[in-house]
Image (cartoon, rainbow, N blue to C red):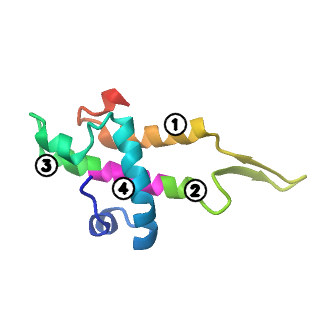
Amino acid sequence: MALDYTYYNQNFPKLTEEEFNKLLPAATKWLSAATHRRADVEVLKASEDYAEWKLNQVNDCLCNIINKMSDISDESGPLKSVSNDGYSESYLMNSEISSELLSEARKWLSGTGLTGVL
């Protein structure tokens, strides 16, 4: 994916450059796997229906996947809820995390022809 911190910070600023660089490889691999590599820059550019707007949608999607990953991976892990009376905590299950990421990807890749593989 051809995404850098400058693009991210101009369009979807939330994280520091260090935090962004930590999550970028995982987000890139996740999106590549979720789209069966159809969202990879090299694959997009080689396809017959390549368009710059499609690459921008993929980058926007990746930025939002990074932000979503940041939301669900704080210091205490993917905390879902806390109850103070009697104290209890519940955490997101892997399937819930995957569902949240897929929902985000579908939203941002809509209209690109890449959502059919999600």
Q: Where residue 101 sits in the image (x, y, percent)?
A: 47, 43
> Looking at the image, can residue 73 be seen?
yes
**Comparing marks 2 and 4, which lies closer to the viewer?**
2
- Seen at 32% across and 67% down, the residue is 5
Q: Earlier in the sequence, mark 1 or mark 2?
A: 2
Of the two numbered discs 3 and 2 in the rendering, the one whose residue sits closer to the viewer: 2
Q: Which amino acid does label 1 sit on?
A: Ser
**Amino acid marked by disc 4:** Cys
Q: Where is residue 16 in the image (x, y as percent from the top left)?
A: 43, 72
For this view, does 53 lie left or right of residue 92? left
The tag earlier along the polypeptide, 1 or 3, is 3
Q: What element carries label 3?
A: helix
The CA distance from mark 1 to mark 3 is 28 Å
Q: Distance between the residues labelled 2 and 4?
A: 15 Å
Indicate which disc residue 73 carries.
Answer: 2
- The structure residue drawn at horizontal position 28% and vertical position 52%, both measured from the top left corner, is 59
Whether residues under marks 3 and 2 lie with C-beta atoms below 8 angstroms apart, the answer is no
**Callout 2 secondary element:** loop
Q: Which residue is drawn at 25% across and 47% down?
A: 57
Marks 3 and 2 sit apart, C-alpha to C-alpha, by 32 Å
Magenta span has 62?
A: yes
Part of the protein shown in magenta: 59-68
Indicate which label's residue lies in the foreground, 1 or 2: 2
Q: Name the residue under label 3.
A: 52
Mark 4, other Cα within 10 Å: few <14 / some 14–19 / many ≥20: many
Numbered disc 1: secondary structure = helix
What type is the residue that disc 3 sits on?
Glu
Q: Say which label, 3 or 2, has the lower sequence index.
A: 3
Residue type, numbered disc 2: Ser
